[in-house]
Amino acid sequence: MPVMFFCRKVAEAVLFVMEAMVGGYVECRWLFAVPLYHFLSNTVKVFTRTPEIGSASHRQDQWWGIADIVTIVERFKVLQKENM
């Protein structure tokens, strides 16, 4: 149990850093932290098969793996449009 608690706390810290980077920068460097967040938050389990998702669901956030970080992604999209 202590390991899961530690992973959850580190995942929260990674999420905080991702949010801070999107708020201050227009660059996409925060995307490098997404796989680490997925792993630490137990969103993705190593060496397990992903469930098949229908072809029409590519528009859903779960398909992209951003269901937990939708607000960060949306804020990043807004910043990108403002700086074009």
Image: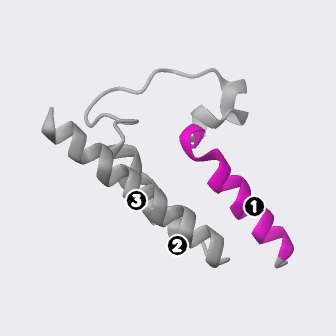
Q: What range is drawn magenta here?
A: 66-82
Q: Residue at x 35, y 26 (%)?
A: 49
**Mark 3, mark 2: which one is toward the viewer?**
3
Query: Does 24 lie within the magenta span?
Result: no
As drawn, the label of residue 14 is 3
Residue 77 circle label: 1
> Left or right of 64: which side holds 33?
left
- Spatial separation of the CA atoms under disc 1 and disc 2: 14 Å
Tag 1 and tag 2, C-beta contact below 8 Å = no
Residue 54 in which image quadrant = top right
In magenta stretch: residue 76: yes
Look at the picture and state if 1 lies above or below 83: above
Q: Where does label 2 land, which residue?
A: 29
Q: Secondary structure at mark 3?
A: helix
**Disc 2 residue type?**
Arg
Residue 2 location in percent, x, y? Answer: 14, 38
Q: Are marks 1 and 3 in contact (CB under 8 Å)?
A: no
The residue that appears at 68% across and 27% down in the rendered structure is 57
Q: Residue extending furthest left?
A: 2
Mark sitting earlier along the chain (1/2):
2
Q: Please identify the quadrant where the N terminus is shown.
A: top left
Residue 50 percent location from the top left of the image? 41, 27
The dominant secondary structure in magenta is: helix
Q: Secondary structure at mark 1?
A: helix
Identify the element where label 2 is drawn.
Answer: helix
